[in-house]
Amino acid sequence: MNRVRDVAVRVRQVLQGDLEEVIALDAQVTGLKKPEYWAELYHRYGMGRRRERQFLVAEGARGIEGFVIGEVRDWEFGSPACGWVFGINVRPGRRQAGIGSQLLEAICEGFRSLGVTKVRTLLARDNNLVLSFFRAQGMMAAPFIPLEMELGQ
Ligand SMILES: CC(C)(COP(=O)(O)OP(=O)(O)OC[C@H]1O[C@@H](n2cnc3c(N)ncnc32)[C@H](O)[C@@H]1OP(=O)(O)O)[C@@H](O)C(=O)NCCC(=O)NCCS
């Protein structure tokens, strides 16, 4: 266990038995309960079948305090293999105690162990909290721009 300020957590691979808490944590933050989505994510990222795919949780004395999900992708957007962080979340009330940093460091360690030297993420332009967090970890603007369009019916 690592003690960071006042919250001690252990970062480990997610287990099926954690899913209910992960779903509740996500619902607390997003206002939406999505059990099928999380079951699918667990199936794809959480079963440890491929080291490139990671779904980690931070476990404290009172249960799951946060999670992070990501994977190593080869040659996406013409770029050599790099780690992508798709989702990170820490329980409100347990934030600013280093848990997010520990989760990110753990997933980056997994990426490094696969020989990857870069990590990327994507976030909403107006999500200042997540931007502050990633900037504090040393992340900088990447040489890509996101594009989208409506597909219509
Ligand atoms: C972003 C998030 C994961 C950070 O988790 P956390 O455990 O609070 O992060 P840490 O305590 O490790 O913070 C590390 C650094 O990030 C920055 N940071 C964290 N919270 C911040 C805040 N509220 N305001 C400004 N900077 C902040 C700080 O620089 C902090 O370092 P410091 O405490 O020494 O100042 C958490 O706030 C969260 O889950 N937010 C919602 C996530 C979300 O919207 N997810 C959906 C998109 S993936």
Image (cartoon, rainbow, N blue to C red):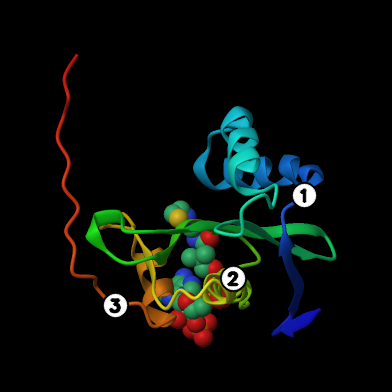
Three-letter code for the amino acid on which mark 1 is drawn: Leu
Q: Using the numbered discs, state the Cα–Cα distance from disc 2 to disc 3 in whole angstroms.
A: 21 Å
Q: Which mark is residue 140?
A: 3
Q: Earlier in the sequence, mark 2 or mark 3?
A: 2
In terms of image quadrants, where is residue 96?
bottom right
Vertically, is 2 above or below 28?
below
Q: Which mark is residue 110?
A: 2
Identify the residue at image location x=77%, y=63%.
59
**Residue 41 appears in the figure:** yes
* Element class at badge 2: helix
* Element class at badge 3: loop
In terms of image quadrants, where is residue 4?
bottom right
Cβ–Cβ below 8 Å for labels 1 and 3? Answer: no
- Label 2 or label 3, whichever lies nearer to me, is 2
- Label 1 or label 3, whichever lies nearer to me, is 1
Position of residue 90 measured from the top left corner of the image (x, y, whole percent)? 60, 61
Identify the residue at image location x=76%, y=71%.
10
Q: Which residue is mark 1?
A: 15
Position of residue 122 measured from the top left corner of the image (x, y, whole percent)? 33, 58
Three-letter code for the amino acid on which mark 2 is drawn: Gly
Position of residue 71 measured from the top left corner of the image (x, y, whole percent)? 50, 57
* Residue closest to the eye, 99 or 118: 118
Q: Determine crowd level at label 3: few under 14, some 14-19, many 20+ residues with C-alpha closer than 10 A.
A: few
- Label 1 or label 2, whichever lies nearer to me, is 2
Quarter in which the N terminus is drawn: bottom right
Q: Determine crowd level at label 1: few under 14, some 14-19, many 20+ residues with C-alpha closer than 10 A.
A: some
Q: Earlier in the sequence, mark 1 or mark 3?
A: 1
Relative side of 122 to 103, left or right: left
What is the count of numbered marks? 3
Vertically, is 18 above or below 35?
below
